[in-house]
């Protein structure tokens, strides 16, 4: 993965998409840190799009718990259909 602007540490998750890649991680903007899940596009997947969500760092633990609960109830079966 090429370096992406604004990330304070390497992203924690990435998913290739047909129109770019989803990237999750900690970023900094105007001196404030936050967590972001965003679609990056462009020829090299290095341009942030408006498609994404940004949240305060203290909201991440609740999101992680919610995702774990969802995963426990909805174990995928069959081929991956995400695109």
Image (spheres, grey):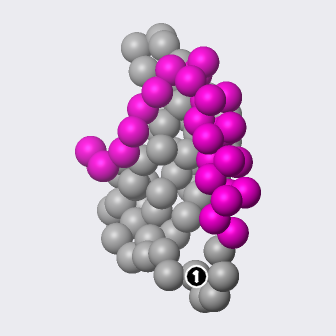
> Which residue corresponds to the image point at 48% horizontal and 57% vertical from the top-left?
22
Residue 53 magenta:
yes
Farthest residue toward the front? 73
- Could you say which quadrant of the image residue 66 lies in? top right
- x and y percentages locating residue 4 in the rendered image: 51, 45
Residue 22 magenta:
no
- Could you say which quadrant of the image residue 76 lies in? bottom right
Q: On screen, 6 above or below 56? A: below
Q: On screen, 68 above or below 7? A: below
- Is residue 54 something one can see in this rendering? yes
Quadrant of the snapshot with the N terminus: bottom right
Question: Which residue is disc 1 drawn over?
Answer: 80
- x and y percentages locating residue 45 in the rendered image: 43, 61
Q: Secondary structure at mark 1?
A: loop
Question: Which secondary structure dominates the residues rendered in magenta?
Answer: helix
Q: Residues within 10 Å of mark 1 (few under 14, many from 20)?
A: few
Question: Is 73 on the left-hand or right-hand side of 56?
Answer: right
Is 41 in front, or is 82?
82
Farthest residue toward the top? 31
Residue stretch in magenta: 49-75
Is 35 in front, or is 45?
35
Quadrant of the snapshot with the C terminus: bottom left
> Which residue corresponds to the image point at 48% horizontal and 11% vertical from the top-left?
31
> Which residue corresponds to the image point at 43% horizontal and 21% vertical from the top-left?
29
Question: Is 60 on the left-hand or right-hand side of 19?
Answer: right
Q: On screen, 59 above or below 25? A: above
> Which residue corresponds to the image point at 67% horizontal and 59% vertical from the top-left?
73
- x and y percentages locating residue 74 in the rendered image: 63, 65
């Amino acid at each position: 993965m090429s370096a992406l602007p604004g990330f304070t540490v390497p992203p924690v998750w990435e998913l290739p998409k047909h129109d770019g890649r989803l990237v999750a991680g900690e970023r900094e903007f105007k001196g404030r840190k936050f967590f972001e899940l965003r679609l990056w596009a462009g020829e090299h997947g290095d341009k942030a799009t408006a498609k994404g969500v940004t949240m305060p760092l203290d909201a991440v633990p609740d999101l992680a718990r919610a995702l774990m609960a969802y995963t426990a109830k909805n174990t995928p079966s069959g081929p991956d259909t995400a695109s």
